[in-house]
Image (cartoon, coloured by chain):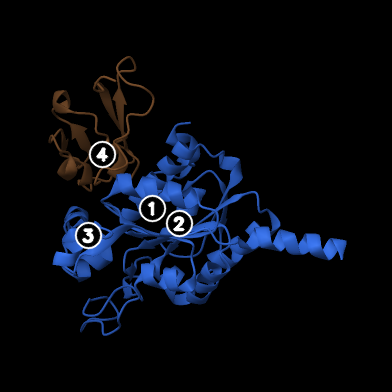
């Protein structure tokens, strides 16, 4: 199947700004799904609110566009009732880790089989450039004109600590790696987190004088390195990319099925 | 497997928003933005069919079409590649 078969062409061109990294995530995700060869009728995409969450309108899967921060809660409901379906939950950084922070850590802790994609552009784009929990100390935003004093989460460390059984990070520049880790995450049985650093040239880039989309992608290219690389030892400022955790632990829906069996016999 | 040979770049001018990502990151400088800020292949003969423009396009606006006889279905770059 061509990737055009996985999208709702009638809604294109999409609403994201010129150069928005979210479009690259959509592009990479479609290719990952095409390469795995999953039928689009077997995929449910659940999203919340924000620029990132508009992705669910553009894909021709079963899609749910739900409440701010609650995508994982809705996805948990879908997965519990139809465990044979593949759940993909794209979220923005604010959606996933501010208002949805509790859902995020508990979905990770339960190890329910779904793929959470954190499209981290470090800002609330849709509402006008307010700082998010991922903006970082010293950055500028509409709501932090004299610079932000909040520190960030490290999405990878947070996910690992919360118990996610697959954790990876990549960027909108590293498209081949993006396709590869998304494939691995979707095929992994358990809660998978893929953080993708994406550029928001309209707000984060402009507010922080980082240039346009091209310059922001150059930044991803020059300031990240493969996990465990020698470059990281020499320059601890580099952001690591790759697969950080992959472990096989009991999955929530499988365990729940066993409980049903036990109770039925009982 | 031989090197993939370019047939054409299909660029959807309705979808292209002129961000210039494809132009900047093309390893062979095949692409440019025209006067309407739409991507066009100005020196297609230099194209090595790496498809990075197609994969990095946020607007799903570029397709690199290769000659079918030369290349099997997937001409993807190796997954171990740094990009």
Real-space Cα separation, disc 2 to disc 4, in angstroms = 24 Å
Residue A213's x, y, as percent?
22, 55
Please say if A79 is above or below A85. below
Q: A240 above or below B30?
A: below
Quadrant assignment for the C terminus of chain A: bottom right
- For disc 1, the chain is A
Tags 2 and 4 both on a single chain: no
Q: Residues within 10 Å of mark 2 (few under 14, many from 20)?
A: some
Q: Earlier in the sequence, mark 2 or mark 3?
A: 2
Q: Which mark is residue B52?
A: 4
SS for callout 3: strand
Percent from the top left, x then y, of residue A10? 47, 41
Q: Which residue is mark 2?
A: A54
* Chain shown in blue: A
Position of residue A37 measured from the top left corner of the image (x, y, whole percent): 51, 36
Mark 3, other Cα within 10 Å: few <14 / some 14–19 / many ≥20 = some
**Mark 2 and mark 4 residues within 8 Å of each other at the beta carbon:** no
Query: In the rendered structure, which disc, 2 or 1, sits on the residue that comes first in sequence?
Result: 1
Give the quadrant of residue A243. bottom left
Tell me the crowding category of disc 1: few under 14, some 14 to 19, or many 20 or more residues within 10 angstroms, Cα based: some
Q: Indicate which disc residue A224 carries.
A: 3
Q: Are marks 3 and 4 on the same chain?
A: no
Tell me the SS state at disc 1: loop
SS label for mark 4: helix
Tell me the residue at 79%/59% (across/down). A261
């Amino acid at each position: 199947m061509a990737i055009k078969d996985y999208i709702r062409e009638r809604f294109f061109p999409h609403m994201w700004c010129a150069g928005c990294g979210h479009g690259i995530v959509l592009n990479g995700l479609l290719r990952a799904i095409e390469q795995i060869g999953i039928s689009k009728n077997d995929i449910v995409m659940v999203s919340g609110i924000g620029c990132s969450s508009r992705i669910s309108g553009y894909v021709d899967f079963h899609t749910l566009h739900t409440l701010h921060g609650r995508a994982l809660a809705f996805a948990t409901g879908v997965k519990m009732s139809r465990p044979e379906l593949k759940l993909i939950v794209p979220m923005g950084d604010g959606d996933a880790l501010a208002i949805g922070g509790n859902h995020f850590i508990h979905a990770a802790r339960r190890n329910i089989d779904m793929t959470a994609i954190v499209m981290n552009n470090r800002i609330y784009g849709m509402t006008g450039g307010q700082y998010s929990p991922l903006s970082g100390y010293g950055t500028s935003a509409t709501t932090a004109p004299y610079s932000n004093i909040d520190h960030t989460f490290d999405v990878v460390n947070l996910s690992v600590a919360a118990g996610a059984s697959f954790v990876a990070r990549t960027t909108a520049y590293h498209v081949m790696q993006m396709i590869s880790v998304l494939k691995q995450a979707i095929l992994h049985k358990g809660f998978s987190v893929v953080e993708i650093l994406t550029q928001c040239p309209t707000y984060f880039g402009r507010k922080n004088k980082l240039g346009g989309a091209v310059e922001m992608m150059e930044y991803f290219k020059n300031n990240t390195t493969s996990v465990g690389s020698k470059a990281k030892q020499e320059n601890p400022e580099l952001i690591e990319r790759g697969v950080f955790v992959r472990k096989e632990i009991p999955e929530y829906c499988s365990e729940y099925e066993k409980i049903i069996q036990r109770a039925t016999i009982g | 497997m031989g090197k993939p040979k370019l047939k054409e770049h299909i660029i959807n001018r309705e979808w292209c928003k002129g961000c210039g990502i494809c132009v900047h990151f093309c390893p062979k400088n095949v692409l440019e933005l025209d006067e309407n800020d739409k991507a066009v292949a100005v020196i297609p003969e230099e194209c090595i069919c790496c498809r990075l423009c197609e994969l990095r396009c946020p607007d799903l606006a570029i397709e690199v079409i290769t000659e079918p006889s030369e290349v099997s279905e997937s001409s993807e770059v190796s997954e171990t590649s740094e990009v």
